Amino acid sequence: MAFLNYKAADLEKEKELVEQAKRDPEAFGKLYEQYFDAILNYVLRRTGNVQNAQDITAEIFLQALKNINKFQWRNIPFSAWLFRIATNEIAAWFRKKGSKTVSLDALREKGFDPVAGDDVEQEALAAQEELLKQQEFLAVLKQIDLLPPKYREVVALRFFAGKQLLEISQILKKPEGTVKSLLHRGLKKLKNNYLRHEQSATF
């Protein structure tokens, strides 16, 4: 569910669930089920690999579970916080490339049994196969990964997670005007880098 489609009643209901999750792992499990697909799909599009996406997504929710008591409600969806964690974890993964990550078992050890539908993982596998067929997409993905972090984060959230400027500003805690500027400059850099890559590949 996109942030901008949230109603006041939805936010109030989610606020209550988040407060419950601070005391009850089962309530956190509900948040997990609600946002698992969106986070996994975003990570998959950033990494292009199902196994890595699953591991990173598990780490994202593990970090959320560990730090849920530090979360402060600011009248924006809980998923903004999850996407912020996701942005950090993806960046860490790209820095470490190939390092061992935490499995879903670590979540179970914390007190709840996450229900990740088999269909989601099957869809993710199918998506990976499709991505691997799209060489142009992978070339663009590589160029996005080469962007400076401040541009990469904004471009990825806009086009891989489908977030609007306001939503990105909430996730990254940056003014909306700054996000708009970063997106504009990031896309310009991406276009120039991709064109240079295409020209070098031609020769």
Image (cartoon, grey):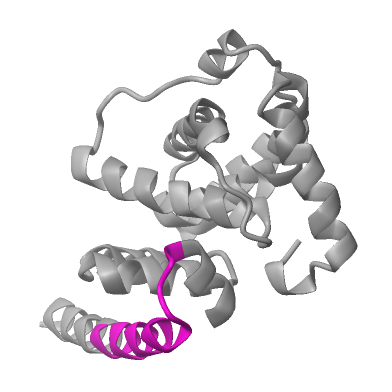
Give the x, y percent position of residue 114. Answer: 70, 23
In the rendered view, tell whether residue 128 sits above or below residue 160: above
User: Which quadrant holds the N terminus?
Assistant: bottom right
- Split into 4 quadrants, where in the image is the C terminus? bottom left
Residue 184 magenta-drawn?
yes
State the residue at coordinates (20%, 44%).
95
Q: Position of residue 164 (x, y in %)?
A: 59, 78
Say whether residue 84 is magenta: no
Magenta part, dominant SS: helix
- Note whether residue 48 is visible: no
Residue 202 vs residue 154, the one in the foreground: 154
| Left or right position of 167 against 76 | left
Residue 39 placement, left or right of 3: left
Identify the residue at image location x=21%, y=37%.
96
> Which segment is the magenta one?
172-189
- Identified at 22% across, 89% down, the residue is 192
Residue 90 in the figure: left or right of residue 164: left
165 versus 160 height, above or below? below
Q: Residue at x 57, y 19 (%)?
A: 107
Foreground of the two, 74 or 203 = 74
Q: What x and y, as percent, mark residue 10?
A: 85, 58
Image location (x, y in percent) of residue 148: 20, 69
